[in-house]
Image: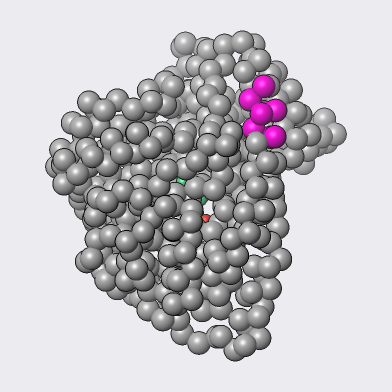
């Protein structure tokens, strides 16, 4: 049996590098421990170390006890969709949409996959750095002709580049707050991007997975609050409510045709999201007070970790680092610590490997697009303060 009998798109999909990095760490950890007596510091994953709030767990249990175990309604249960409309109003300041504008999905991931599939084989544009899953999974799976527009060193936007790239594009992928940079796109930036997309007749796929993880009293600005019809906004409960394993998400668009098409995609793939889980999702979004408390506590902890991490990184002479405004990642530039004569694949892995030798797991920058080989992503979503401090000591050792 040879590969050419199978879908070329699927053969081009890559498993997340984060999985292979975690496997590598698992292999190295025992030897590291026996040598140093210490554990690895794990900065590689976007997992969350808070439990799912009990009131959400109880809502799932109640739904099960009530026998809500039958096939879900196509595109999503009314109870979930009504809660989404409520949340879109109080959190995203989005009005003028109704249940027909929504499709409920298995996490943000399915919302994004359906959206990319909508433009199968067509030209798409997005900023680099870019979430690795877009590049490794959605783009090859959907045969997208994906053009990466580099953000500047300070992660600002070159609008001329963007304008040129959008010519002939079907869609632009925007992720705010952004993985891996932690950039929170301002209202002005989001509006300018959407205006440029409108000028070129391009759709916007807006990935708002980290909408609730925002620091310094700043606010996430949701493109869904703009009037432009051709925006597909994708949301997830994973990060907001520490529900990564529940696989609950949804998408919203003012475009009339898209929900019907994506409902067909959703039905074809899975026939909809597990019915009783949708009742838990509804509780998470409806219980505004409890949810706000949960989010505040979580964000306060992340902000503490971010500040300690930032103070440590910024104290390293020659390391270039931007303070994240949202999400839970740092994306520093290590180019001053890589010898000039190191190039190609060796360069891509240089810092990552040196960090592994010191017992630190990270994700190498090339996973996030074409322009950031000298960068490394550190996640602080599962690392308590002591681990961050320990990790910083070890990072400092390779910065000489
Ligand atoms: C930028 C971004 N978008 C979307 C997602 C999707 O999350 P989920 O499928 O768990 O909802 C993730 C998860 O890590 C992410 O980092």
What percent of the width, then of the height, locates residue 34?
Answer: 83, 36
Q: Is residue 306 magenta?
A: yes
Relative to 107, 371 lies left or right: left
Relative vertical location of residue 21 with respect to residue 309 in this rendering, above or below: below
What percent of the width, then of the height, locates residue 165?
Answer: 21, 34
- Identify the residue at horizontal 75%, vertical 35% (top origin): 385
What percent of the width, then of the height, locates residue 130?
Answer: 41, 38
Can the viewer see residue 364 in this picture?
no
Relative to 199, 112 lies left or right: right
- Identify the residue at horizontal 61%, vertical 81% (top origin): 63
Relative vertical location of residue 55 with respect to residue 319 in this rendering, above or below: below
Q: Nearer the viewer, residue 344 or 179?
A: 179
Relative vertical location of residue 14 with respect to residue 287 in this rendering, above or below: above
Please count the marks in the image: 0
Q: Is residue 362 magenta?
A: no
Relative vertical location of residue 318 with respect to residue 29 in this rendering, above or below: above
**Outermost residue toward the right?**
37
- Identify the residue at horizontal 36%, vertical 71% (top origin): 99
- Identify the residue at horizontal 44%, vertical 77% (top origin): 78
What percent of the width, then of the height, locates residue 222?
Answer: 40, 47
Q: How is the image coloured?
A: one colour
Q: Nearer the viewer, residue 21 or 90?
A: 90
Query: Quadrant of the rendered structure where residue 51 is?
Result: bottom right
Say which quadrant the C terminus sits in. Answer: top right
Q: Which residues are magenta?
A: 304-311
Relative to 33, 220 lies left or right: left
Secondary structure character of the magenta stretch overall: helix
Relative to 323, 303 lies left or right: right
Can the viewer see residue 68 in this picture?
yes
């Amino acid at each position: 049996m040879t590969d050419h009998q199978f879908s070329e798109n699927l053969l081009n999909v890559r498993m997340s590098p984060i999985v292979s990095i975690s496997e590598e760490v698992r292999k190295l950890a025992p030897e590291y421990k026996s040598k140093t007596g210490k554990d690895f510091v794990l900065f590689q994953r976007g997992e969350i170390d808070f439990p799912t709030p009990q009131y959400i767990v109880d809502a799932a249990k109640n739904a099960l006890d009530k026998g809500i175990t039958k096939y879900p309604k196509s595109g999503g249960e009314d109870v979930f969709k009504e809660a989404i409309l409520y949340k879109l109003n109080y959190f995203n300041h989005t009005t003028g949409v109704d249940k027909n504008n929504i499709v409920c999905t298995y996490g943000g991931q399915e919302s994004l996959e359906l959206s990319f599939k909508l433009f199968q084989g067509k030209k798409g544009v997005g900023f680099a750095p870019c979430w690795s899953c877009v590049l490794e999974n959605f783009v090859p799976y959907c045969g997208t002709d994906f053009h990466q527009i580099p953000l500047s060193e300070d992660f600002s936007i070159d609008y001329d580049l963007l304008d040129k790239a959008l010519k002939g594009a079907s869609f632009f992928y925007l992720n705010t707050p952004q993985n891996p940079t932690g950039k929170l796109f301002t209202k002005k930036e989001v509006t300018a991007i959407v205006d440029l997309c409108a000028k070129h007749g391009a759709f916007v796929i807006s990935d708002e997975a980290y909408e609730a993880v925002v620091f310094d009293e700043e606010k996430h600005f949701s493109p869904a609050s703009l009037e432009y019809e051709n925006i597909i906004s994708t949301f997830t409960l994973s990060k907001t409510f520490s529900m990564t394993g529940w696989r609950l998400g949804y998408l919203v668009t003012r475009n009339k045709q898209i929900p019907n098409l994506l409902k067909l995609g959703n039905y074809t793939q899975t026939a909809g999201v597990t019915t009783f889980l949708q009742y838990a999702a509804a509780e998470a979004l409806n219980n505004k007070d409890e949810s706000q408390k949960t989010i505040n506590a979580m964000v306060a902890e992340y902000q503490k970790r971010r500040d300690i991490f930032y103070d440590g990184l910024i104290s390293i002479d020659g390391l270039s680092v931007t303070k994240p405004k949202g999400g839970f990642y740092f994306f520093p530039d290590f180019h001053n610590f890589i010898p000039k004569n190191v190039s190609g694949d060796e360069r891509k892995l240089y810092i990552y490997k040196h960090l592994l030798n010191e017992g630190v797991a990270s994700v190498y920058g090339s996973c996030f697009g074409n322009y950031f080989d000298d960068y490394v992503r550190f996640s602080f979503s599962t690392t308590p303060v002591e681990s961050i401090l320990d990790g910083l000591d070890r990072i400092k050792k390779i910065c000489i």
